[in-house]
Image (cartoon, helix red, strand yellow):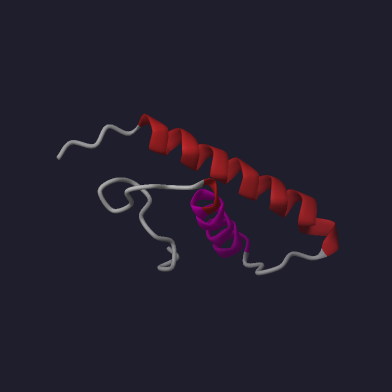
Amino acid sequence: MCRSIKTLRPPYAETVTEDDMRAAALQYVRKVSGFRHPAAHNAEAFDKAVERVAAATEDLLSSLVVRS
């Protein structure tokens, strides 16, 4: 996958912001789609995918139980 996506769950990340989750989602969608910047006719689908992946990331992180 994309090596520039950092791990967002504790203990790797003490605080995770919406910007962190959106950046990870953007990297993921760029990798999967093969577009760094989509053409105008694909922009809506691209942006919607980023929002959905960011929401799924937030759901996942809020549901995880990390045991130390």
Q: Position of residue 51 (x, y in %)?
A: 63, 44
Please give the name of the residue rendered at 62% of the width and 67% of the height, measured from the top-left corner.
34
Q: Taking 25 as reference, is 60 left or right?
A: left
Q: Is residue 26 magenta?
A: yes
Q: Is residue 46 magenta?
A: no
Q: Position of residue 7 (x, y in %)?
A: 35, 55
Rendered position, 62 above or below 21: above
Q: Position of residue 16 (x, y in %)?
A: 42, 47
**Quadrant of the drawing holding the C terminus:** top left
Q: Main secondary structure of the magenta part?
A: helix
Please give the name of the residue rendered at 38% of the width and 47% of the height, measured from the top-left corner.
15
Q: Residue furthest front?
A: 15
The residue segment tinted magenta is: 20-33
**Quadrant of the drawing holding the N terminus:** bottom left
Q: Residue furthest left?
A: 68
Q: How many numbered badges does the structure rendering display?
A: 0
Please give the name of the residue rendered at 85% of the width and 58% of the height, measured from the top-left corner.
41
Q: Position of residue 38 (x, y in %)?
A: 74, 64
Q: Taking 16 as reference, is 28 left or right?
A: right
